[in-house]
Amino acid sequence: MPEMDKEGKKFYVGVRQKSELFYVKGSTELDWGMKNRLARIFNPKDGKTVMLAIDHGYFQGPTSGLERIDISIMPLVLYVDTLMVTRGILRSMIPPSVIKPVVIRASGGPSILKELSDEQIAMDMEDCIRLGVCATAIQVFIGGEFESRSVINMTKLVDAGLRYGIATMAVTAVGRDMKRDAKYFRLAARICAELGANFIKTYYTEEGFETVTSSCPVPVVIAGGKKIPEMDALTMAYCAINEGAAGVDMGRNIFQSDSPLGMIQAIKAIVHDNEKPEQAYKLYESIKNSK
Ligand code: R5P
């Protein structure tokens, strides 16, 4: 017979049970599993994320800086909050002992040689669960040739994700001839959020970016875009954070830098410690020169 429990007295009668609002923008009404996954992506300390994007191979093959992910990228993983990656690279290159949350690339189809907006959903939710990912990522081509289909594909991922508690990141993909301004990203980010995306990736715009973040009811993270000088990339990250971004999902400006280790740590200092670009640049240089 099991031992009888000794009756406790710590009932705290009259002390109201805590019920906190969830800190990730627009996510208070979600279920526990989804919130828990978002809390792994967006650091509970400050609600922000340093996400390293290394999914570029899904449409452009062995991108410069990503030729050998095992050698070039693995040393950076220690400094990131989240990894954004394809399932092929996750399974073949990332040791399962890495316990960083994963945002998985779940769309694909056309290569860089074809019309990029012709993407489809390229991953089943069952495999997302098998891999233990926290969110899926899908391109949405507002204004693009296959605009409607990309929007509807996003809603399909949102529905499947809601069923299992896996968040959806909508990536606002700008066509080659389209203007990357605040007006465009306000439109694209808001459409994605209205139709259920849990967080949105846009580019930073020098003018009016704060209107993109303020009119979007869920977190916005910025992509880095093509490689620019380190100081410019750090300044862009600093401005984005101070204009309401919930973090970065940056790739080329980190892994194509002459010191990826320096850049990832400098970006981290900006996102999580609100370090000024000049100070972050000094950190980048000192890490670069310490080799
Ligand atoms: C987007 O389509 C790519 O897959 C990358 O995830 C995204 O562009 C972020 O990387 P980068 O900072 O290099 O632009």
Image: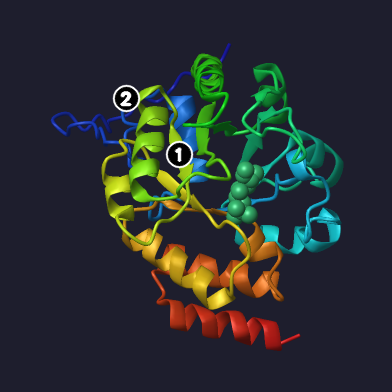
As drawn, 96 above or below 191: below
- Mark 1 surroundings: few (<14), some (14-19) or many (≥20) residues within 10 A: many
Q: Are marks 1 and 2 in contact (CB under 8 Å)?
A: no
- Mark 2 surroundings: few (<14), some (14-19) or many (≥20) residues within 10 A: few
Q: Residue furthest left?
A: 14
Where is mark 1, residue-wise? 200
As drawn, 115 above or below 66: above
- Kind of residue at badge 2: Glu
Query: Residue 288 vs residue 96: left or right?
Result: left
Query: Residue 103 vs residue 3: left or right?
Result: right
Q: Position of residue 109 (x, y in %)?
A: 73, 27
User: Which quadrant would the N terminus be assigned to in this image?
Assistant: top right
- In this orientation, which residue lies closer to the viewer: 204 or 67? 204
Name the residue rendered at 50%, 15% in the picture: 159
Which secondary structure lies at badge 1? strand
User: Which quadrant would the C terminus be assigned to in this image?
Assistant: bottom right
Q: Residue furthest top?
A: 1
As drawn, 268 above or below 205: below
Q: Position of residue 199 (x, y in %)?
A: 44, 37
As drawn, 79 above or below 164: below
Where is mark 2, residue-wise? 29
Disc nearest the viewer among 1 and 2? 1
Q: Position of residue 24 (x, y in %)?
A: 36, 40
Residue 26 seen anywhere in this rendered image of the structure: yes
Query: Residue 74 vs residue 32: left or right?
Result: right
Which secondary structure lies at badge 2? loop
Name the residue rendered at 75%, 64% in the picture: 75
Give how far apart the Cα atoms at labels 1 and 2 are: 18 Å
